[in-house]
Image: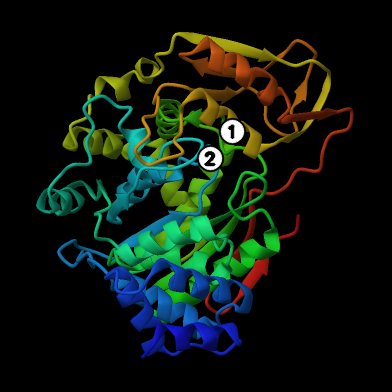
């Protein structure tokens, strides 16, 4: 088998076989074929696309390129949740203790984020002492004991995907639905869970800007999961404005604690209920969304989810005083209040610009080795649809650098579109995709 022939075949629009896809993934992982040939194949895939069968094969090949995590020692049905990423998205941190309190094991492997804020691990490490550096035995024991633990993804989890993504990033071939879907699902499937709930974000603050592309990506991933014998479902959710009010690392953890104390933002709570309900149904803890909602609201209102979160933080070395008094998490040199220049209804808060502001403040990283400031970020005071008067508070900028703060001020102002008329509010949940059905909700 020759790489040259595989490139020609795909360039000419033909479907690749399982053997051909496995050959190219295996050889590239082992460095036995050059970057320029893989780049040529990626460009051919970008233009000629892949069918569902090819997409499943490349996902499987990348999944099998490294370690497959065995979670069989964890009792119960394991359900994983994955988000394609958005501004202010802290649902993993909130959902873990909520679902665990409902009796479903949540064994999460998370990473450090590139972009406007850190990833789940970065956010949790804003709690002094918290660590994901626990042994596999402690990880499994913690899940069996309190139903929830988070550890760092191993470097050997789908290594082919890591290599392939780096090449896609510099060859203009990132934005291909099959390559995106296989990249996400290869890592999810390597984790050994029984079922997967996907949160596919759409809007200006999401990776997928176009709603039709978001549904297409969701369908591709659901098809992959189904072909790999995992129960898989996807929700399409709005990311045209930030989720919740807080965008940062420590600030987002504080907002999660507020939610678990029954004081969190309504949109964050509703998203947790929507995603969590699907997790409980797949785990066979609830038969209907209505019963699942009742379970989730009960563990939040009773404090059961908060107690799980406290025990989770304790088991992983975190200082509980920061959970008992979350104001301790918010330590910066300066908090600047952004005022409105006009009166009217907020029609838009452009999530992408808000994300750029937090990156500018130092809350995110552009390289994985970059150091981030876990304390800085933004807290919104108004959301889309709210009425604001001239001079009223729009948002608060938490910073440790006045130069970065000043650069952020005008940029953040440009994120707000304020008009005389109240906007038509876009729903948070825009649709659902299962193996048998795609349902788009009315806007």
Point out the tag, 2 or 1, that comes first from the N-terminus.
2
According to the image, label 2 marks what residue?
Answer: 268
Picture quadrant where residue 327 is located? top left
Circle 1 packing at 10 Å, graded few (<14), some (14-19), many (20+), is many
Q: Position of residue 436 (x, y in %)?
A: 56, 79
Crowdedness near tag 2: few (<14), some (14–19) or many (≥20) residues, C-alpha within 10 Å: many
Depth check, mark 2 against mark 1: the one in front is 1
> Where is 26 relative to 331, above or below?
below
Residue at 62% over, 12% down = 337
- Residue 99 x, y percent position in the rendering: 36, 50
Question: Closest to the observer: 77 or 25?
Answer: 25
State the residue at coordinates (52%, 64%): 234
Residue 84 spot, x, y in % from top left: 51, 54
Q: Nearer the viewer, residue 294 or 31?
A: 31
User: Which color scheme does this rendered protein use?
Assistant: rainbow
Q: Where, by quadrant of the figure, is residue 14 drawn?
A: bottom right
Residue located beneath label 1 in the image: 356
Q: Is residue 227 left or right of residue 70?
A: right
Looking at the figure, which quarter contains the C terminus? Answer: bottom right
- Judged from the image, the secondary structure of the residue bearing numbered disc 1 is helix
Q: Is residue 291 left or right of residue 354?
A: left
Residue 254 seen anywhere in this rendered image of the structure: yes
Q: Marks 2 and 1, how far apart in space?
A: 21 Å
Q: Is the residue 252 above or below the residue 405 in the image?
A: below
Q: Are marks 2 and 1 in contact (CB under 8 Å)?
A: no
């Amino acid at each position: 088998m020759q790489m040259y022939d595989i490139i020609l075949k795909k360039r000419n629009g033909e479907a690749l076989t399982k053997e051909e896809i496995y050959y190219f993934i295996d050889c590239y992982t082992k460095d036995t074929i050059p970057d320029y040939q893989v780049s040529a194949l990626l460009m051919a895939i970008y233009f000629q696309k892949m069918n569902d069968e090819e997409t499943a094969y490349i996902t499987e090949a990348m999944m099998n390129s490294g370690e497959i995590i065995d979670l069989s020692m964890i009792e119960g049905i394991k359900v994983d949740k994955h988000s394609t990423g958005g501004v202010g998205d802290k649902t993993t941190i909130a959902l873990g203790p909520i679902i665990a309190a409902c009796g479903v094991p949540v064994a999460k492997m998370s990473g450090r984020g590139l972009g406007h804020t850190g990833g789940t691990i970065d956010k949790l490490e804003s709690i002094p002492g918290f660590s994901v550096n626990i042994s596999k035995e402690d990880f499994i024991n913690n899940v069996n004991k309190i139903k929830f633990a988070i550890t760092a993804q191993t470097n050997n989890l789908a290594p082919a995907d890591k290599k392939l993504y780096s090449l896609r990033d510099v060859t203009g071939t990132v934005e291909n639905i099959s390559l995106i879907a296989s990249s996400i699902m290869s890592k999810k499937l390597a984790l050994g869970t029984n079922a997967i709930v996907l949160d596919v974000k759409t809007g200006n603050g999401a990776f997928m800007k176009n709603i039709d592309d978001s549904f297409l990506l969701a369908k591709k991933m659901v098809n992959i999961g189904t072909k790999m014998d995992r129960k898989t479902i996807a929700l399409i959710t709005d990311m045209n404005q930030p989720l919740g009010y807080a965008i940062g690392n420590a600030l987002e953890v504080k907002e999660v604690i507020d939610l678990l104390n029954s004081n969190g933002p309504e949109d964050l709570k509703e998203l947790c209920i929507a995603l969590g309900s699907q997790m409980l149904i797949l785990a066979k803890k609830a038969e209907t969304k209505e019963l699942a909602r009742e379970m989730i609201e009960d563990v939040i209102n009773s404090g059961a989810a908060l107690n799980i979160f406290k025990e989770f933080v304790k088991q992983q070395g975190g200082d509980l005083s920061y959970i008992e008094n979350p104001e301790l998490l918010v330590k910066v040199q300066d908090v600047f209040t952004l005022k409105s220049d006009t009166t009217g209804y907020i029609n838009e808060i452009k999530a992408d610009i808000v994300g750029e502001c937090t990156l500018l403040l130092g809350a995110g990283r552009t390289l994985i080795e970059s150091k981030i400031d876990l304390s800085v970020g933004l807290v919104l005071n108004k959301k889309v649809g709210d009425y604001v008067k001239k001079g009223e508070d729009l948002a608060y900028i938490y910073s440790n650098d006045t130069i970065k703060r000043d650069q952020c001020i005008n940029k953040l102002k440009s994120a707000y579109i304020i008009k005389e008329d109240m906007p038509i509010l876009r729903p948070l949940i825009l649709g659902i995709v299962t193996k048998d059905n795609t349902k788009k909700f009315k806007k």
